[in-house]
Amino acid sequence: MRLQAAMSFAAALIAAAAAQASALAAEQAVTVPEPTFDETPLDASAPAVAVFAGGCFWGVQAVYQHVEGVLKAVSGYAGGSAENAHYELVGEGDTGHAESVQITYDPTRISYGKLLQVFFSVVHDPTQLNRQGPDQGPQYRTTIFVANARQREIAERYIAQLDAAMIFPKKIVTTLEQAAFYPAEAYHQDFLVRNPTYPYIVINDAPKVRDLSALFPDIYRSEPVLVMPRPVSRRGG
């Protein structure tokens, strides 16, 4: 009887935790229009780089790894110094860093504006200040780290376009900043691919990849582009 009671109590705790986690899970995807102002393929002579912050970098990286035209998506930190670009320090919330993803892409295959459309649609909720899903603090802020005046103009115009169209129930709080990017520790790279059953991933991040597939089928790629390629298995001879 004690074992049965303990098992029932444990089951109740698990159910309660699951319900709470579901309530705190990532926001639902939103269909947003394409930006009316964007870069053109004529701007492209080499791969370009975009850096976005929208909550925990595991999910942000996972989404962009499935976008056609993206050559690499690296989890990391931006907004603070090189000295404090470490997970444990950033997690304290006072380093100036935001968990970010550096996206290297081919501008002849996908534009900066299209990457922003994905960012505002399936990656995160841009109306939440210093939080996303269950994560709270300035390290989880919504930020576009612009590399140049052109990116800034595209981002500013797009935010104004979405606010004017009242796509979201509240005003977008995404900030535009300029800062160096520092790659995160190796164990954070390709986290969703390497840990698909991790509870946080199942609840918060896997749904974002599914939303990308549903809302952007024309740019969705089923096989993700990885930071650390999977090892090639060798058959014994």
Image: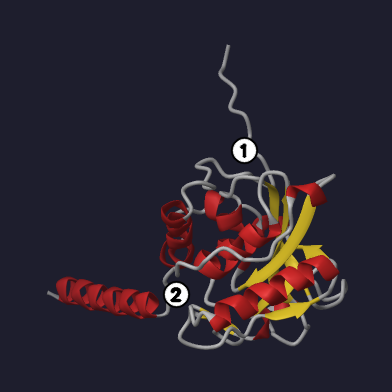
Q: Earlier in the sequence, mark 1 or mark 2?
A: 2
| Crowdedness near tag 1: few (<14), some (14–19) or many (≥20) residues, C-alpha within 10 Å | few
Task: Report the residue at 74% width, 58% height from top.
Answer: 39
Which mark is drawn over residue 189? Answer: none
| Crowdedness near tag 2: few (<14), some (14–19) or many (≥20) residues, C-alpha within 10 Å | some
Q: Position of residue 155 (x, y in %)?
A: 70, 72
Question: Pointer 1: what residue?
Answer: 230
Task: Report the residue at 86% width, 76% height from top.
Answer: 81
- Seen from this angle, which residue lies furthest front? 36
- Which amino acid lies under the numbered mark 1 shown in the image of this protein? Arg
**In terms of depth relative to the viewer, which is nearer, 195 or 156?**
156
- Which amino acid lies under the numbered mark 2 shown in the image of this protein? Glu
Q: Position of residue 92 (x, y in %)?
A: 69, 84
Task: Report the residue at 56% width, 77% height from top.
Answer: 162
The local secondary structure at tag 2 comes to loop
Where, quadrant-wise, is the C terminus in this rendering? top right
Where, quadrant-wise, is the N terminus in this rendering? bottom left
Q: Position of residue 106 (x, y in %)?
A: 73, 46
Residue 82 position by quadrant: bottom right
Task: Report the residue at 68% width, 65% height from top.
Answer: 37
Asked if residue 82 is positioned above or below residue 171 in the image, the reply reads above
- The answer to whether one can see residue 87 in this image is no
Question: Pointer 2: what residue?
Answer: 27
**In terms of depth relative to the viewer, which is nearer, 21 or 5?**
21
Asked if residue 12 is positioned above or below residue 103 in the image, the reply reads below
Dot in front, 1 or 2: 2
